Image (tube, rainbow, N blue to C red):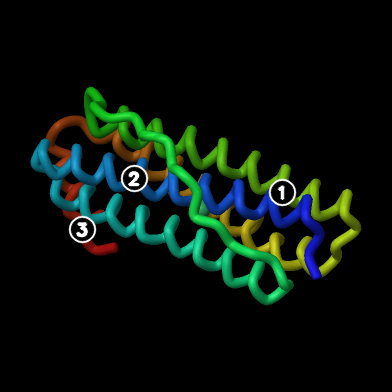
Amino acid sequence: MITEKLEKAFNDQITAELWSSNLYLQMSFYLQKEGWDGCAHWMLKQSEEERDHAVELAGYLAKRGGTAKVSMVDVVPDGWGSVEEVFKHVYEHECHVSQLINELVDVASAEKDKATQDFLWGFVREQVEEEATASSILEKIKKAGAAGLLYIDGSLAKR
Ligand code: MG
């Protein structure tokens, strides 16, 4: 059985994952409108992945006797100036999410819940990948210039 404190922390993280999902969906809409179809596709997949994270957290909570809640999700930002600005935001947001996951591990640790810590290491590892991927795309965009951006857009369409 999961403790009440940890259940609340999990539900807060579910809300955060859904917010992330909406953020990336909004980014996908923006990119699509600007004609960056490949980037929009990549971002849509990213949005779906965040929703999957919420579902995964809910599944774990249920297994441990907790109750998963879909709470109100705040409005997400809209309107970026460029593709580079969008991916800079993705990178910064993923660093923020890593912090949230670390704090969740801290709660599990304070509650002496070993099983939950073990479960969360998967999320900790996932964030290493998320930060690295976002950073790598951002660095490529910075180097690319206008013509190179078309090539990057084409490669992101393959996700
Ligand atoms: Mg996530």
Which residue is at 65% across, 48% downward? 101
Q: Earlier in the sequence, mark 3 or mark 2?
A: 2
Asked whether the viewer can see residue 44, the reply is: yes
Q: Is label 2 in a helix, a strand or a loop?
A: helix
Amino acid at the residue labelled 3: Ala
Label 1 neighbour load within 10 Å: few <14, some 14-19, many 20+ = many
Q: Is residue 78 left or right of residue 125?
A: left
Residue 146 spot, x, y in % from top left = 14, 32
Asked whether the viewer can see residue 152, the reply is: no
Residue 151 spot, x, y in % from top left = 17, 48
Q: Nearer the viewer, residue 7 or 136?
A: 7
Q: Nearer the viewer, residue 14 or 120?
A: 14
Which quadrant would the N terminus be assigned to in this image?
bottom right
The residue to which callout 1 is attached is 104
Query: Marks 3 and 1: which is nearer the front?
Result: 1
Amino acid at the residue labelled 1: Leu
Relative to 99, residue 115 above or below: below
Which residue is at 45% across, 40% downward? 135
Q: Nearer the viewer, residue 47 or 38?
A: 47
Kindly identify which numbered label has been placed on residue 81: none
Quarter of the image for residue 10 reads: bottom right
Amino acid at the residue labelled 2: Tyr
Q: Are marks 3 and 1 in contact (CB under 8 Å)?
A: no
The residue to which callout 3 is attached is 157
